[in-house]
Image (spheres, rainbow, N blue to C red):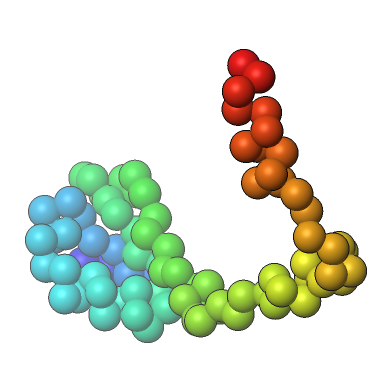
Amino acid sequence: MTHICDTLLNVPSINIRQLRDTRRLKAWLRKGSTVELRERDRVIARIVPEKEAAQGVREWPDFAARSHQIFKGRMLPGADLLIEERGRY
C-alpha cells in the first residue's frame, strides 16, 4: 500500500499485516528501496536495504607480511614463557 505523499517520494510502505508477504518486501529491498512500516497510517519504522559494498567479498590483510614487517622475522617466545610461568601460580 503506497500513500499519496509517499508516491511523490517513491517510498513504498507496508503495514504490519502485509509483512507476511515477504516476496514483495524482498523485491523492494533488493531494488534498493527503503520501505516504511506503518501502523494505522503512522510510520513506526523504516526498513533500509543493506549497501552493496557491505555485501561484497572482503579481502583480508596479509597477516604474514604484517608480522614480518613488525617483528622482522624474530620469533616471540610466548609459548615458552607461558610454560615456564604455569608452575609459578
Side (left or right) of 16 relative to 58: left
In which quarter of the view is residue 12 placed? Answer: bottom left
Q: Is residue 78 visible?
A: yes
Q: Is residue 6 visible?
A: no
Q: Is residue 62 left or right of residue 1?
A: right
- Whole-percent x, y for residue 59 in the image: 60, 80
Judging depth in this view, the residue of 87 and 44 nearest the camera is: 87
Q: Is residue 8 above or below residue 78?
A: below
- Tell how many labels: 0
Give how far across and how far down residue 32 sits, in percent: 42, 78
Residue placed at 16% from the left, 75% from the top? 23
Where is residue 70 drawn, in percent x and y?
Answer: 87, 64
**Front residue of 11 and 68:** 68
Depth check, front residue: 40 or 35: 35
Instruction: Name the quadrant containing residue 13.
Output: bottom left
Residue visible at 21% across and 45% down?
A: 40
Q: Residue at x 20, y 55 (%)?
A: 15
Quadrant of the rendered image containing residue 65: bottom right
Q: Is residue 27 left or right of residue 16?
A: right
